[in-house]
Amino acid sequence: EDYLEQSGGGSVQAGGSLRLSCIASGFSFEDFDMSWYRQGPDNECELVSAISSDGTTYYEDSVKGRFTVSQELTVSSHIAKNTVYLQMNSLKPEDTAVYYCAYGSGVVVGPCLDDEYKYWGQGTQVTVSS
């Protein structure tokens, strides 16, 4: 069974840090990306960061130098499990959003979950107060 399960998030003051985690299981992780998206009050889905199977990373300009994506791939009983992290430092109020992990990457138009070509985590709220 394939699934994505998120944890982490919460509320923090500006300048603080949070770490998001996403456990993905049941997927093939060869030649595929894992991504973090966020959706703010405008309901537009924004690609924040991505990491490929070879460790290549991508960051949206506004989070470069503040966010770090990483992954831990394990195989047990022939089942691959990938835990993807998003370490968020120096958080700003404009980082406030619902954050989603996804199996896949690329631009999403409109709300994140409207994209039926990706698998999505359940989402987690990040709130940064000034």
Image: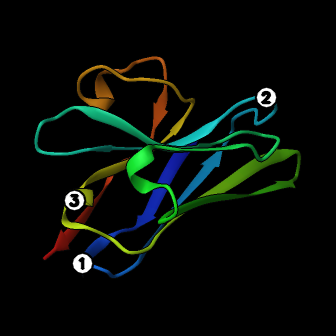
> What residue is pinned by disc 1?
14
- Which residue is rendered at x = 31% and y = 30% of the image? 113
Which of the marked residues, 3 or 1, is nearer the chain's N terminus?
Answer: 1
> Whole-Å distance between the Cαs marked 1 and 2?
36 Å
Q: Residues within 10 Å of mark 1 (few under 14, many from 20)?
A: some
Residue 105 x, y percent position in the rendering: 54, 29
Q: How many residues crowd around disc 2 within 10 Å: few (fewer than 14), some, or many (20 or more)?
A: few
Q: Earlier in the sequence, mark 1 or mark 2?
A: 1
Q: Is residue 70 above or below residue 42?
A: below
State the image coordinates of residue 96 (x, y, percent, origin top left): 22, 59
- Which secondary structure lies at badge 1? loop
Q: Which mark is residue 58?
A: none
Q: In screen coordinates, is 118 left or right of 109? A: right
Q: Can the viewer see residue 124?
A: yes
| Amino acid type of the residue that numbered disc 2 sits on in the rendered structure | Asp
Circle 3 or circle 1, nearest the eye: 1
Q: Can residue 85 be spotted in the picture?
A: no
Residue under pointer 2: 31
Amino acid type, mark 3: Thr
Q: Nearer the viewer, residue 91 or 111?
A: 91
Residue 67 position (above or below residue 56): below
User: Which residue occupies 78% across, 40% down?
Assistant: 53
Residue 86 position, x and y percent, is 52, 61
At a point 29% along the width and 33% down the height, the residue shown is 45
* Label 3 sits on residue: 96
